[in-house]
Image (spheres, helix red, strand yellow):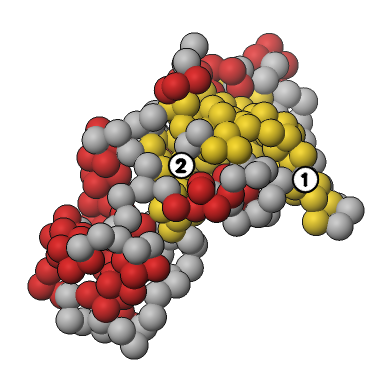
């Protein structure tokens, strides 16, 4: 159990409505200092709205709690000064150079000794040799580095990253995550939303939000174990036809292609095995496997109710 002093985020019952729709519904979350907390869920699940409430850009309609020791309802201006927020879209001036963009952000935050701060930021993210390049000329990976450098220039205590690696190549993603783990080891707390399961597995803790409701949280093993999902892998010929036969059968909750195999999953082990027995053919090899994070999240998504229906 974490002591209050360890908690960078400690909120309960956080709720946000837009008109008649509740897009974040009584979410509780605790995040410790130096922790990388992955926030996952389908598009439209309320992840971005929740992040914006944490960093003071939106006011919750319900709930209470603190972020960085400040009240999320009444001390939003103080929270903003100590948070670095990286949005989904590149939001810097494309007709300014990297250095000019960082200098502008440093001015906004009134960073002391601005020139030195910009130099440190350029060096940390490997941007020195591109400092005079226009932001609009950068590839996705270099834009990502600029965005992260800008988030860090005022030495925040909390980093909120909203799908920061969307659209960048695997090498850039790996370099980005190496930097995030380095920052966490130095005591910076990170809350990150992602759709990539390999990135989710790099987080210390996970929370899964679907249509405004928090459905699961914990470490990767804890989330997988709590789902109680039984998964079989089947290989062989005619898998597409087999998948069609299996869907909607008793005990089968999902049938998902994984390369040259199918993953067939459900929560009732006995019922699932009984159904599998009715479709077994000599050309197929069935193997019970441990459910993976993607199996679990697809299952959670399938069972969630869309709050906009």
Residue drawn at (36%, 57%) of the image: 151
Q: Is residue 193 left or right of residue 52?
A: left
Position of residue 230 relative to residue 133, above or below, is above
User: Seen from this angle, which residue lies furthest right?
Assistant: 20
Residue 191, labelled with which disc? 2
Residue of label 1: 61
Q: Which residue appears at 47% of the width and 26% of the height?
A: 7
Where is residue 25? Give x, y as percent. Answer: 75, 39
Structural crowding at the residue carrying mark 2, measured as other residues with C-alpha within 10 Å and reported as few (<14), some (14–19) or many (≥20):
many
Residue 287: x and y in percent read 47, 22
Decide: is 257 above or below 264: below
Of callouts 2 and 1, which one flags the residue occurring earlier in the amino acid sequence? 1
| Camera sees residue 11 | yes
Q: Residue at the spot x=44%, y=22% of the render? A: 5
Residue 260 visible (yes or no): no
Q: Distance between the residues labelled 2 and 1?
A: 22 Å
Q: In this view, does 257 lie to the left or right of 184?
A: right
Secondary structure at badge 2 equals strand
Nearer to me, 295 or 304: 304
Closer mark to the observer between disc 2 and disc 1: 1
- Residue sitting at x 65%, y 54%: 58
């Amino acid at each position: 159990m974490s002591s209050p002093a360890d908690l960078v985020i400690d909120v309960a019952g956080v709720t946000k409505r837009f008109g008649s729709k509740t897009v974040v519904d009584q979410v509780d979350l605790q995040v410790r200092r130096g922790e990388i907390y992955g926030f996952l869920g389908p598009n439209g699940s309320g992840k971005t709205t929740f992040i914006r409430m944490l960093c003071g850009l939106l006011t919750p309609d319900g709930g209470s709690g603190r972020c960085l020791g400040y009240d999320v309802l009444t001390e939003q201006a103080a929270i903003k000064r100590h948070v670095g927020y990286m949005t989904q879209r590149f939001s810097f001036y494309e007709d300014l150079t990297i250095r000019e963009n960082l200098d502008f952000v440093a001015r906004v935050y009134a960073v002391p000794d601005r020139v030195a701060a910009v130099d440190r930021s350029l060096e940390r993210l490997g941007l020195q040799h591109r400092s005079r390049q226009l932001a609009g000329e950068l590839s996705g990976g270099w834009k990502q580095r600029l965005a992260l450098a800008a988030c860090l220039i005022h030495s925040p205590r909390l980093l909120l990253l909203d799908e920061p690696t969307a659209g960048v190549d695997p090498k850039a993603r790996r370099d980005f995550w190496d930097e995030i783990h380095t920052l966490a080891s130095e005591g910076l707390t990170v809350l990150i939303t992602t759709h990539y399961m390999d990135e989710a597995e790099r987080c210390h803790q996970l929370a899964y939000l679907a249509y405004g409701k928090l459905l699961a949280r914990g470490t990767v093993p804890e989330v997988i174990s709590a789902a109680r999902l039984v998964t079989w892998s089947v290989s062989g010929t005619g898998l597409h036809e087999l998948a069609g036969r299996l869907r909607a059968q008793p005990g089968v909750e999902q049938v998902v292609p994984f390369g040259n195999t199918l993953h067939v999953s459900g929560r009732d082990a006995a019922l699932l095995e009984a159904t599998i027995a009715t479709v077994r053919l000599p050309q197929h090899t069935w193997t019970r496997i441990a459910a993976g994070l993607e199996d679990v999240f697809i299952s959670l998504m399938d069972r969630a109710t869309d709050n906009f229906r």
